[in-house]
Amino acid sequence: MTKDNNYLGKLDTIVKELSGSESYNLIYHTPHHGEPMPSTDVLVEIVNTLKEVLFPGYFRHSSLKPETMEYYTGVNLDKAFRLLSQQIVRGLCFACDESDDSMCDSCEVKAESITIDFLSRLPAVRDLLSTDVKAAYMGDPAAKSYGEVIFCYPTIRALTNYRIAHELLKLEVPIIPRIICEMAHSETGIDIHPGAQIGEYFTIDHGTGVVIGETTIIGNNVKLYQGVTLGAKSFPLDKDGNPIKGIARHPIVEDNVIIYAESTILGRVTIGKNSVIGGNIWITHDIPPDSKILQYKG
């Protein structure tokens, strides 16, 4: 097999076009201070390690004994600390606009401080996840045990990643929270932005296609079914035509609300407590408490 005589010339042309095009400047990432992007493979390892701490005995080392629990937890937390602090440094460098390399030393110190602060929040994260497990179990007659819910249900997988990512976002960690939530999105089909605020005893039945936007606020004892969207309407632009960031643009869902499959709720509207939203409903206005919104009465 012989190569085309013009192969090298054509290849050189392609390289120059790819390296010099206008789009190149938009999508090229220059590593700041020599630090690469956060590693998705390492973040998967971190989440899996944290799951071992949050749900001991369910993942990896299923033969865990109560008498060795503290040693097991300590080893995993030490591992999580080392891996996560390194990834947070990378995240900080990704978002950094400083040109002074001496700033990197302070980033390492900051990353370690953030990491230990995050780890200190894990007991509260586990408490919230335990309420999510209870809500999923109590809300599904097919569930045979809490263990089945923890091990099998996509809602718990998605909420575990979300609740981890949400705490990291509150600590102002760049990019990593989005990566962690997108990992769960890819696996479960449940898209939860880490900026959303979600109360206790939350569950999503089935889950595929659920979307929960960045500024969504969800109260306690809320249940969603598959295909529900808590999204934004068209949002305002600045004088240069760019979307205005940081505005509240997603729904508020108060306590004890059920939203059935494929319903879409858009904009900064409030779904009042104790309400039921039927399937395939389109809502862009406030719903009073104790409402029942249905397409037909049956």
Image (spheres, helix red, strand yellow):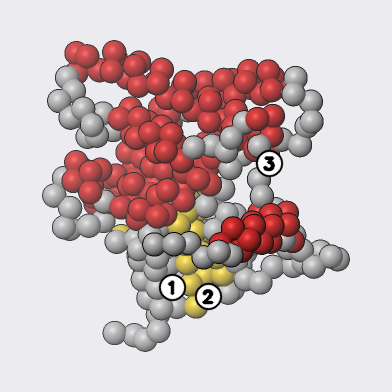
Q: Residues within 10 Å of mark 3 (few under 14, many from 20)?
A: few
Q: Position of residue 31 (x, y in %)?
A: 66, 37
Give the residue number, with chain letter if any, for mark 2: 283
Amino acid type assigned to the residue bearing label 1 in the image: Ser
Q: Nearer the viewer, residue 171 or 39?
A: 39
Q: Is residue 166 above or below residue 92?
A: below
Give the residue number, with chain letter if any, for mark 3: 30
Task: Tell whether label 3 touches label 2 (CB within 8 Å).
Answer: no
Give the residue number, with chain letter if any, for mark 1: 263
Identify the image quadrant of residue 92: top right
Q: Is residue 35 left or right of residue 98?
A: left
Q: Nearer the viewer, residue 115 or 261?
A: 115
Asked whether the viewer can see residue 168, the reply is yes
Amino acid type assigned to the residue bearing label 3 in the image: Thr
Q: Position of residue 281 (x, y in %)?
A: 45, 78
Real-space Cα separation, disc 3 to disc 1, in angstroms: 42 Å
Q: Residue at x 52, y 52 (%)?
A: 193
Identify the image quadrant of residue 113: top right
Q: Is residue 25 above or below residue 118?
A: below
Task: Tell whether label 2 touches label 1 (CB within 8 Å).
Answer: yes
Q: Is residue 43 left or right of residue 154?
A: right
Which of marks 2 and 1 precedes in the sequence? 1
